[in-house]
Image (cartoon, coloured by chain):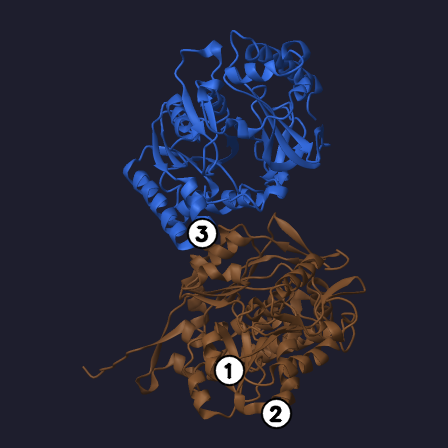
Amino acid sequence: MVDLSRVQQARERLDAHVRDLVAWHFSPETGCPFWLDFASRLDFDPRDKIGGYADLKKLGHFQDEWLRGGPVRRWIPKGLAGKGVSVFETGGSTGIPKYRVSMDDFRIDYEMFSDTLSDETFPKGCDWLMLGPTGPRRLRLAIEHLAQYRGGIAFHVDLDPRWVNKLIKRSAFHELELYKEHVVDQALTILKANDKVRCVFTTPKLLEALCAKIDLARYGITGIFCGGTEMNAQFHRFAREELVPGIDFRPTYGNTLMGLACHKPFVPEDEYRITYYPPHPRAVIDVVDPDDPNRVVDYGETGRVMLTTLTREFFVPCFLERDEGERMGPIDLYPWDGVQNLRLFSRLQSSVVVGVY
Amino acid sequence: MRQFPVLRAGKPYQSVDRVPVQHFLTGEVMGELSMANSGMIPWDIRHKREWSQRLSSIGIAQWESIFTRAANAFECDVLGAFDQSFEDYLDQLSATTGMPLTLCRKNAAKISAALREIRPTLQGLMRGMDPSQLEDSRGGVMFRREAACMGAVLPSNSPGVHSLWLPAIALKVPVVLKPGRQEPWSPYRIAAALIESGCPPEAVSIYPTDHAGAREILMNTDRSMLFGDERTVSPWRGDARVQIHGPGWSKVLVGEDMGEEVLAFVDLIERSVCENSGRSCLNTSSVWTATHGYELADGLAKRLGAINALPLNHPQATLSAFAQPEVAKLFSKMVDELLQTPGAEDMTAKYREGGRVAVVDGAHFLLPTVVWCSDPDHPLMQMEFLFPFVAVTQVPQGDLLNHLQETLVATALTRDEQWINQLKVAHQIDRLNIGPIPTFHIRRDQPHEGNLFEFLYQQRAYQEERQF
C-alpha cells in the first residue's frame, strides 16, 4: 500500500512547481516569445489564475504543430538568454520538423535517470553502445551525457528513422532488411573492437536484430536500456527470458517533449506489464478520456496519454500524445500517477508508421 | 474458451499478449489467440536446419502413414490434446468466419483429402515420379532442397487453402504459419492431427501475429506462400521466394465457333462463379465471349439472381456472410460506383428482390451479381470481389487476347484449334483449361499456382564414381 502522505507531498510539490514555472514562463523578464505572445491573447494573466496543476487546463491543450518550423528562438526563455542552445527534432516523420530547444534539460533528465540505474549492471566507468536514432534527435547527446555522467564513453551507431519510414511506406522490405543489417553490423564491429562496453541503449527491433547475431552477455554486456515503439508486455517477457536473460533489462519511455520516464521495477506478479512513471514534477502524465480530455479516467481504465512538461527551459501544458494506456496508481518509489501498457493511440493506428526504431 | 498458443516448433507457448477470436455475429469470445511478438519469429527460425534434419530422418513411406493417420484424426470426434469434435470444429469455423456449415464441411473435406491422398498428391507434384526418389538418386536423378523451412501467411476466408501448404511437410520441409485472425481453427486442428499421428512437432510452427510478424515470416523463411488481396501481395511480387496467392482474375473465354451453344454452358459458368461462395482466386470473375454476350449475361443473371442468402446452418446455404458488415457494404458501394462508368449494367438487379446486400438472422451477405459491360475495357471487367461476382463482355475473337490481363485460370470454350494454339502461348494466362472445365477444378497432377515441389526442390546434377 502506498503511503498516502507521500502522494499528498508529491502533489503539493507539483502545485508549487507549477506556480513557480508559470511565473517564470509568463513573466516578460524570463518567458519566451511564444508564451508571452500566447498570454497576450488571453483574457486573463496565467500568473494570477493558475494556482496549481489542475488549473493548467485553463490554457487549453498544447498543439505539437506549434513546434513545427521556425523561428526556433521564439521558444528560448529570456531568463536563459546566453546559454548554449541545442535544438532537437521530434519523431520520424518527414516534412518540416517539429523542434524543441534545450540547454540543460536533457542532461538533468538523464542524470535523474542515471540515479535509478544499478552500479553493478550499469557499472560506472564503463563504456556504452548507443544503437538507435541519433542525428538531430535528443537521444544522441542524452545517451552520450549519460555515459559521461557515469564516467564512460558512448560509441554511436546511427539509425535514420525517416529513411525507415520511407522504406516501410513504399513496402521496400528487402531494402529495410539490408538497412537493418547495415546498422547492426556497425554495432557488432564496435562491440568486437571495444571490450569495455558494458551498457547498451537500443530499441526493441534493433535489440532483436543484434541478439540474432551475437550473445550480448558473452560480449560482456550487463545492462540494457531499451526504449521506443513496440515495447509491449510480450516483448518485455521475450527480452528477459530469451534475448538477454541475465542482463539487467530496463524498459523506458522517453520522447523529446517530456524527457524520460522510468519503468516500475520488475516483479513477476506484474506479468511483464510495463508501467511508466514520469519524472515528477518536471513532467506529468495523465490518462484521459479521449472524448473528454478534461476527464482523467479511473485507475485501471484505458485512456489517451496527456503529457505536461514543466521545466524552466520548456513548458508544454496538457499535450495529447499519440499514445494510449491504462492509468496506474502511485507506488512508494513514484508516489504519483503512471501509465501501463503504453501503445499507439488506437484511433491513430492507421496513420502512424512504426518502423525498426 | 479455446486457447490457441503460439506453436514454436510444435511446442505450445502462452503469450502474455492475447486477442479474442469472436463469433462474427454475437461477439461471443470463442477462443483466445496468443500473439507472437514479431521478433520471436526470426529468433526461432534460426533453428530451421535442426527442424529440417528431423523431418529428413523420416522416409516417404512413413510420411504416408503419418498423413493417413492424421486424416483419420482430423475427421475423428475427439482429437487428443486438442479435444474438439469434428462437428464442433465445423460449428466454430462457421461461427467466426461467417461461412455456412455446408461450405465448412466441403473445405474440411479438402483438407482431409490432402492428408489422406498424400502419395498421389506428391506424385502429381513430382510429375508422376515416385516420391521416394527424394531419398534416392536412382537413374542419376537427384533433388536438392531449396528450403529449410517454408512460411505461409494464411487467410481467414477459405479453409480449403490449407491443403496447399500441407504437402510441404511430407516433402520434409517444416512449415511456419501465420493463421488468419478469424480462422485459427483449421491450422491448429491440422497440427494437432499430425503431431498426434507421429509427425515430429518441429514440422509445424504457428505464430498468430501482426503485419510485422507476417513480414518476418516472409523475410526469414526460404520459401513462403502469401495469401491476400492485391494490396497485401503486391510488394512481394517479383520475390521468387514468395509464392503469391492473391486475386486470380480467373476467366471464362468463349470462342466465336460456339455460337448459340454457349448458352448451354450457363451452368458451368454459374458454378465457376459461385463455388465456395465466390471467395477463391479460382472463381470466375469475368466472361469474355466472341458471341451472344448479352444473352449469356442475361442467362447467368437469371440463375445467379435466384440465389438467396440463407441461415448459415441451412443445408442448402451456399453464400458466406461477411464477418464485418461494413466490408459487405463497401464492396456493394464499389460495384455501384463503378456501374456509374458508362457501358455497364447490373443484369441481376431485375431478377432479385431488394438490393445486393442482404441481411439474414443479423448476418450480412452480398448476393451474386452479374454485370454486362458493353466496353471490354470497362473497369468492372478487371474486378474481383469476395462474393459471387462476374462481369460479361463481348469482343471479337481476334481482338480478345489484346484486352486480356493477368489471369490465374482461363477456361476456354472453343473447338477452334487455331485459337486454342494462340491461347496456349498467351503470356497472361497461368493455368489453361480447354473445354467445359470449371475454373476452380484442380487436378493433383496439374498443380495450381505454381508447383510446390518445384518451389521447394531443384534437380541437381549428380555423378558417382565409387570404385576408386
Residue B459, x across and y down, in percent: 34, 78
In the rendered image of this protein, which colour is used for chain A?
Answer: blue
Disc 3 or disc 1, which is closer to the eye? 1
Left or right relative to B32: residue A233: left
A213 or A323, which is in the foreground?
A323
Figure check: A39 above or below B155: above
Can residue B450 be seen here? no
Q: Is residue B373 above or below residue B238?
A: below
Is residue B360 depicted above or below B135 in this figure?
A: above
Both labels 2 and 1 in a single chain: yes
Q: Nearer the viewer, residue B396 or A129?
A: B396
Task: Tell me, for residue B396, which label it has, or none.
Answer: 1
Q: Element under label 2?
A: helix
Say which quadrant the N terminus of chain B sits in.
bottom right
Query: The disc labelled 2 sits on which kind of residue?
Result: Glu
Q: Chain of mark 2?
A: B
Residue A335 horizontal/vertical position (percent): 64, 22
- Disc 3 crowd rating (10 Å Cα; few below 14, some 14-19, many 20+) is few
Quadrant housing residue B284: bottom right
- Relative side of B50 to A189, left or right: right
- Percent of width and height locating residue A215: 39, 45
- Under mark 1, the amino acid is Pro
* Residue in the image at 63% along x and 43% along y: A346
Can residue A250 be seen? yes
Q: Name, please, the residue furthest toward the top.
A: A29
> Pointer 3 and pointer 1: residues touching (CB < 8 Å)?
no
Q: What numbered label is drawn on residue B261?
A: 2
Kindly indicate which chain is depicted in brown in the rendered structure. Answer: B
Residue that appears at 64% across and 78% down: B109
Subunit ID for the residue under disc 3 = A
Residue B85 position by quadrant: bottom right
